[in-house]
Image: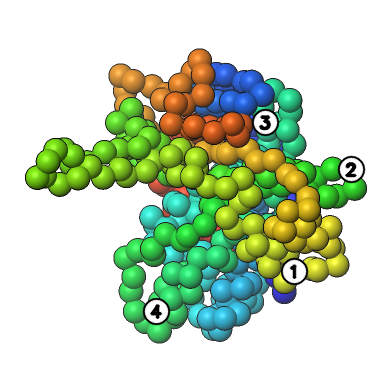
Amino acid sequence: MSKAHDIDVPTEAFSKWLNFEDFLRTDDYHLLVTSDDERTAPPVELIGAYLESAYADARYYYHKICNLDLHPVPGTRTSAVQFPNSLPDNTRKGMFGEALCGIVVQTYLLLENDRDFDVPVFLFRQHSGVEEALTILKRGGTIKEVPGRHGDDFIGIEVDEEGWIIGFIVGEAKYRSKMNASVYDGLMNDQQSGSGKTGKKRKKVNRGILGKMVNEPDLPISMNSLKRILQDIDEDRFERLIVSIEELDIGIRKADRVDLVVLACAETAKKAKPPYSPTTSRPSDHKTTRPLVIAELVIPQGGDLITSLYDDLYR
């Protein structure tokens, strides 16, 4: 059956691996950047256990609708196709970035006032292209990529003492093999193309992550998707979260929102190390009053780490 994201997060091990340094920490802007000083090696088994918990709901969901074997012993499975192991590398890297949102949120108290968010479940089942990809692979076909999914990459929640939702943290994640100032700018900030002069092609604005976030409402786009997943897993257990979402949706309850961006890469430019985000004030493209958290994460040999992690899941 579907499972919530139930795991005792190894915060000490994760914090030593990520080894984030607070470049700036205020009530409305928090910039975290990995430091190489006294950083430990990736705790592979602990990361793998976290990923298995993060994917548990979506794994059950996709295996059920695609008629894939969920037997815990690999040698007895009727199909070698598995979620998320069998998906293309680029898709797995993107999903790893989304899981990193959860690791950051569940490992660190964010912002100056120590906001404490939790992750009851991830949104991986809300990716329609995955069902098609797994079906093609099961029937002997091949795929090179899976189109990105719509909606929020990640939603974490903050609850009061009685379990009612009082806040959200909504995340966008990107993984790149190499990061530099130009790649960062292309991801984060609005880009204009065309001259805009009379008789020529009009200027087109390609929204960066921050520009897209500004245009989003305070309530997460995928909030009702989160509600449906919680209902499927255990409607009684998550009753207050489900009712909170329903009341938020019709406007009789209020919750604030924190925006989160996680940028992960395997290496950075040698002459221009991170942070690439502003270090004295929040980015100018984040034209909203919502608090913003940016985590810039460098994972040495990140591609190899992700490949080994995802090849070994549920083995």
Q: Decide: marks 1, 3 in contact (CB < 8 A)?
A: no
Quick one: 181 or 247, which is closer to the camera? Answer: 247
Q: Decide: marks 2, 3 in contact (CB < 8 A)?
A: no
In x, y percent, where is residue 28?
Answer: 62, 26
Label for residue 110? 3
Q: Distance between the residues labelled 1 and 3?
A: 28 Å
Residue drawn at point x = 39 percent, y = 64 percent? 146
Query: Which image quarter: residue 195?
Result: top left
Identify which amino acid the numbered label 3 is placed on: Leu
Residue drawn at point x = 83 percent, y = 62 percent? 239
Q: The C terminus is located in which quarter?
A: bottom right
Q: Can residue 310 be seen in this view?
A: no
- Ranked by sequence position, the earlier of labels 2 and 3 is 3
Give the class, few, some or many, for how many residues have Cα within 10 Å of label 1's Cα (few <14, many ≥20).
Answer: some
Q: What element carries label 2?
A: loop
The image shows residue 217, relative to residue 29, as above or below, that is below
The image shows residue 41, relative to residue 7, as above or below, that is above
In x, y percent, where is residue 238?
Answer: 81, 61
In x, y percent, where is residue 21?
Answer: 57, 21
Label for residue 161? 2
Q: Is mark 4 on a helix, strand or loop?
A: helix
